Image: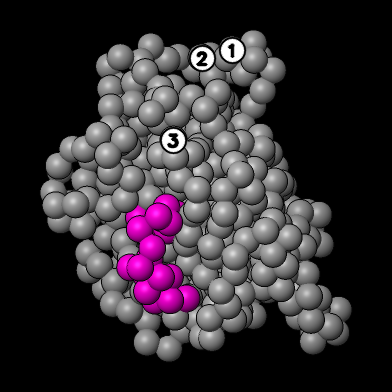
Amino acid sequence: METTDAFTGLECLDCGASFDAADEPGRCPDCGGVLDPTYDYDALDLTRNSFASDAIRAGRAGVWRYEPLLPFPRDAAVTMDEGGTPLVECPNLAEELGVGRVLIKDEGRNPTGTFTDRGAAVAVSAAAQHGATDVALASAGNAGQAASAYAARAGMASHVFVPSRASFVNKAMINAHGGDMYVVEGQIDDAAEAYRDVMDERDDYYALQTFVTPYRHEGKKTMYYELIEQLGWETPDAIVHPTGGGVGLVGMHKAAREFRELGLVDEVPPLYAAQSEGCAPIVEAFEAGRDEHEPWEYPDTICGGIEIPDPGESRLVLEALRESDGGAVATDDQDIMDSAATVAQHEGLEMGVTCAAAASGAWELAQEGAFGEDDTIVLLNTGAGNKDADMIRSRLMARGM
């Protein structure tokens, strides 16, 4: 494998066993735990100017400007220049929330319109390093679209299992990228079961499933790197992230600890998981003080991207929330859709319905007194609003707006 200088391999987050990345692309063979890329941080000589200088010299930005903290070099990457998304100042929202600043990290400007492109880029790069010809995953929609796009760029076949309620846009674009799509009746758990059945029979399919590949959360951690640079190396007072499986939150928490360990910042900011009241296993577990969730028996939300009733690695998500002194919040679907419309009308930014859980959650947290009047709050818009335009418009029409 062609890897970066400081990348040392994979470590199991459950049993602590270490593995050569060339040998173990999936879960821990000893205990089944999540494998996490590891680095020799002492071997890195990074300053706050390092990433900017590298980007300027190479004429590039985005995920791969952070090459020293990624497993693979840019020269070996499957990339469409993902990342480098703006952090947009939202003064009207700040006034409405009663805080000093609100900024939205607009991930809808990635190649396929969501933050899943960051994870797909690194995970498909790993698949290429392992000589894969086929990649497979189950997805609520966006991750499947991203995987099919990056697989197409790498010359691989993709096999994507989506629930029947996945959005038309996701299904259409999986087809457009040449993906082999299986539409499974039911919800994401049903699609995941169909995926596992096929994977049991196909040892030639490279798994891109969340927390099965070690590399999707590794790509998503770059969101944190970017927003800290964009804030002038000041840590925000809170980051609110729409949360289903939690891979983005886990990645951002890792990045925050890395920057602190490298001496680039002093603090890890509070991380907040935002969910819909119709499917909120992370919120329920956090409020109950449990280390793991209990499956949500009857999921019912229009927020398909975070309708994950049984997130596989809730322990890691809850650990990130508690270690960062953050929290979890759930709001109902009507409030979430109203928040998407409010952001569009007051700031001009287009948030996906799923993503607007972050805005709705931030309003709820503000009402609960979680934020101070001088606080800087970052909201993650994890996907483009045009993927859900019909739902947002239907809500406006129902309200007579």
Separation of disc 3 and disc 1 at Cα?
28 Å
The residue shown at (48%, 67%) is: 138
In front: label 3 or label 1: 3
- Check disc 3: other Cα within 10 Å, few if <14, some if 14-19, many if 20+: some
Secondary element at tag 3? helix
In the picture of the structure, the residue carrying the numbered disc 1 is 53
The magenta segment = 191-212
Above or below: residue 263 compared with residue 203? above
Disc 1 marks a residue whose amino acid type is Ser
Question: CB under 8 Å between callouts 1 and 2?
Answer: yes
The coloring applied to the image is one colour
Query: Residue 334 got which mark?
Result: none
Residue 90 drawn above or below residue 278: above
Q: Is residue 229 left or right of residue 210?
A: right
Query: Which of the pair 172/108 is nearer the observer?
Result: 172
Please name the residue shown 68% across and 52% down the image.
Answer: 112
Up the image or down, 203 lies above or below 8; here it is below
Classify mark 2: helix, strand or loop.
helix
Q: Position of residue 255 (x, y in %)?
A: 41, 37
Residue 129's label in the rendered image is 3
Q: Which residue is mark 2?
A: 50
As for residue 250 lying within the magenta part, the answer is: no
Cα distance in 3D space between marks 2 and 3: 27 Å
What amino acid type is highlighted by mark number 3? Answer: Gln
Q: Position of residue 76 (x, y in %)?
A: 52, 27
